[in-house]
Image (spheres, rainbow, N blue to C red):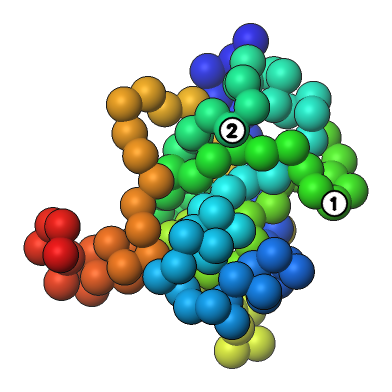
Amino acid sequence: MANRITLNMITQRSIEEGVAMEKGKTTPEYFEACSIIEMHDDDVKALGLVPNQLVRVTSECGDVVVKAVRGRQSLYPGLAFIPQGVWANQVVPPRTQATGEPQYSGFPVTVEPVNGERRKSALELVQGAVGLWRGDQ
């Protein structure tokens, strides 16, 4: 059982994210649809995770705490998925390779279990990113 694992991250739209986004990015539905990481069962087992355990995902540009869930789509060992949105944006590298879009897929992340931490809300993450978060509001 490893304390951390390095995976190849992809992020894209998901059906759950799209439906929840229509209700609003501050709704519980959006939070549950997007503050997750889907991983292959082999990677979950390698980390010794239990279902719905919180993990920290860290890339070269940041980190975020999300809930580890069983892959809803076909994922290979070594590949992880976070739906596009506020949580994914915390770890997506800003490189554009001259495309005008950040590198949403194909970048390395480290995933490790966390204890005593919680997933932040979309509002906390967005306001925190620009220095406006002042605690519970």
- Say if residue 78 shows up in the picture: no
Front in this rendered view, residue 22 or 88: 22
Q: Residue 34: give x, y in percent of width and height.
A: 57, 59
Front in this rendered view, residue 111 or 98: 111
Q: Give the foreground label among 1 and 2.
A: 2
Left or right: residue 9 versus residue 102 is right
> For the point 64% across and 27% down, which residue is it?
51
| Residue 50, quarter of picture | top right
> For the point 79% across and 29% down, which residue is it?
41
Left or right: residue 41 versus residue 136 is right
Q: Residue 66: give x, y in percent of width and height.
A: 49, 45
Residue indicated by mark 1: 73
> For the point 49% across and 34% down, which residue is it?
55
Q: Tag 1's secondary structure?
A: loop
Front in this rendered view, residue 96 or 48: 48
Q: Quadrant of the N terminus?
A: top right
Task: Confirm or deny contact between disc 1 and disc 2 (CB under 8 A).
Answer: no
Residue indicated by mark 2: 52
Left or right: residue 132 versus residue 40 is left
Q: Residue 104: give x, y in percent of width and height.
A: 63, 68
Left or right: residue 86 versus residue 118 is right
> For the point 55% across and 62% down, which residue is it?
29
Q: Is residue 54 above or below residue 89?
A: above
The label shown at residue 134 is: none
